[in-house]
Image (spheres, coloured by chain):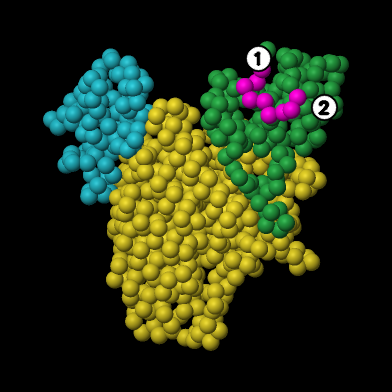
Amino acid sequence: MANPQFYLREDTPCSDAPIAFADFGDASNAIAVRIEPGDDARSLLPHLGQLAMIDISFPAFGDGRGYSSARILREAGYEGELRASGDVLIDQLSNMRRCGFDSFAPSTPLDENAAKTAFATWDDVYQKTVDARTPIWAKRHG
Amino acid sequence: MYQYDQYDQAMVDARVAEFRDQCERRLKGELSEDQFKPLRLMNGLYLQLHAYMLRVAIPYGTLSAKQMRMLGHIGRKYDRDYGHFTTRQNIQYNWIKLEDAPDILADLATVEMHAIQTSGNCIRNISSDQFAGAAADEIADPRPWAELLRQWSSFHPEFSYLPRKFKIAVIASEEDRAAMRLHDIGIQLVHNDAGELGAKFYVGGGMGRTPMIAPEIRDFVPADELIHYAEACLRVYNRYGRRDNKYKARIKILVHELGKDEYTRQVEEEFAHMKTLGLNPPVAELERISTYFADPDFDQNAPDDLDMSDPDFRIWVEQNTHAHKQSGYAIATISLKPTGGIPGDASSDQIDLMADLAEQYSFDELRVTHSQNIVLPHVKKADLYALWQKLDAAGLAPANLDLVSDMIACPGLDYCSLANARSIPLAQKISERFADVKRQQDLGELKLKISGCINACGHHHAGHIGILGVDKKGFENYQLSLGGSGAEDTSLAKITGPGFDEDGIVDAVETVTNLYLKTREDGERFIDTYRRIGMAPFKEALYG
Amino acid sequence: MKIVTGNDLKTGDVIWWSGGETWSRHLGDAIDAGDEAEAVAAREEAAMRVNVPYIVPCEQSDQGPMPLHIKDRVRAFGPTVRADLAINTNIPIVKG
């Protein structure tokens, strides 16, 4: 399977093809799984230790469930590769990054420079999320 | 009033730069309309019936004179010399060019304003009580809470592609002037038994084709947990709100289908989780924001008496002013509903004048109301007469607040590509039919609300009298409904029966008000009489 | 007859297809696209000469093409409540 177009981790992208969430049972020893918008990311929590890559699918950019899935996984301590795949566009990159994605596999490749700008859209942010950035309110009351 | 610090300003400036880039990419063809649409919508830019339409946020309805003047300037420079104030404390411009849109946003940013998230499937402008900070009956100023929510909801990375739009209102009085329970989240500030200030949450209200009144899901959220709780409400919605049918995608449908108890259980579970993450700004942040909403320097010795020997002035005072928390002051509402006028429209000159008057008489402050009027919140009673004279000279002194001609009307088919029928001509005809203000005063409080389609932007479900325009085989037809309320006695109106044509509906309004006049008991408003006698007599009078 | 309308991408103005690669602000200039309407809309949108085009069923009247639906007549002539903003016509939008 192709490498993600953008990979923001120090290690190397997981080369295993992810198996479908529906096929990932307690008995599975897969290290990569793919979840669709309607799948419950929380049911992966008991298995985070064995997973090297979770691929969160965006069949349509307007379906924002994948953002919640990503944050839930990071909030639970998942530290492996979190890949956004499918209808991933320039203008969603910054939000995805903030929700914990560190790997991006858009179905249509994106312009490298535009992506770079997009990842750097905000100097500061209002919310505390899972990206370890200090929110504006914390800076104000440093 | 809140003032941006360098962080707030940088956020808005960054957004302008981002949108300028997006517009350029669209104009060059690098973005398709399908890709560009959600981006322009998140900056308030629609493609409407005649042109692009820009919706500018007026957060919790509060404006300074300088900001108000900027709204006039935008109308003059980029539009056709006017703007339209909406029911969610926004202003809309109907004739915008895409190539100008980034410049407009840049102009707005110079006065700490923006069009961020005034459309799209995200958290919209946070609305509030237009009398906040002035009302005699509030327990606290709700605006610091609204500002805290504004910052939290701005560019929220998880909640920018929700199943559908999401509207939040915050109030702090028992009297609801913001239709709070008809919002996706309605928040009422309350005290708990220990005397601490917190938030009561109502979730799942809304209008549209399936109107619902939000049930209360939590009686008290402490100040230092507000964001955690809001985040929990939104996460459950983002994950489980319906995405298969846009007409069933609002949170009201989720709350209805899961049931209030199950939705609440899921929110509480998520809330418990959020609390472990430390996402909530400290109370010190709410306190920092609150300092900007401190009372202006009121004259503690301002006289409380008022010379009302001028009968026209007396009517205006009786109708358009409200009790202020500070003795010697009043809250004055400027009605944008002249006889035969377009509800909510104001010319750039009128906008400038209102800005001048705010500077002169109201500590530099104005408010926008959900019923499409403008408020000068802090007017010395001693100045009311001079203020009224200046308003009257500019056609801004209709003495009709909360009367039949103080209608809410959506733009309708004259401007809106979603509409099935025109709303504004009806509003004009009804206001002309009831032009006599004495007659209107005799009818008393009467909230008439007109929508040009089922999306209900004109709040017809919440009208004492509601009118819904529909397309009947290519002709405009109007359904009459009775018994709705967007106030603290929230209720949803019921349809009387078969619809009417344009003239017929004006007659029908007169028929039901005549029946009310004949039937009312002492002190009853139209809605009270309706609630007492029910629909049948009205049906009989209309169709009998 | 079928005519094609949409908005100018840059200005947002309502425009009407007037043959070939030309578009007009005036309904009177619109011409019948007939069976080609879909193809015209697709081609012109791809060439970015129009944004969000769609096809409007019309009848031929004394004043030229007249959209059958009131929404398209309001589009063509401007808001009925602001005569000062009307687009150069005295044609009544609401048919009696």
* Chain letter of the residue beneath label 2 in the structure image: A
The label number, if any, that marks residue A136 in the structure image: none
Question: Chain A: what color?
Answer: green
The residue located at (79%, 43%) in the rendering is B273
The residue located at (50%, 40%) in the rendering is B18
- Residue B143 at what x, y percent from top left? 59, 61
Indicate the quadrant where residue C21 lies: top left
Q: Which residues are magenta?
A: A3-11
In the rendered image, residue A7 lying in the magenta stretch gets the answer: yes
Q: Nearer the viewer, mark 1 or mark 2?
A: 1
Element type where label 2 sits in the image: helix
Label 1: how many residues lie within 10 Å, few (<14), some (14-19) or many (20+)?
few
Q: Nearer the viewer, residue B191 or B252?
A: B191
The residue wearing badge 1 is A2
> Any idea which chain is the cyan one in this picture?
C
Q: Nearer the viewer, residue A116 or A88?
A: A116
- Sequence-first tag of 1 and 2: 1
The residue wearing badge 2 is A48
Q: Is residue B97 above or below residue B92?
A: above
The residue located at (35%, 63%) in the rendering is B352
Element type where label 1 sits in the image: loop
The residue located at (70%, 34%) in the rendering is A100
Amino acid type, label 2: Leu
Amino acid type, label 1: Ala
Majority secondary structure in the magenta region: loop
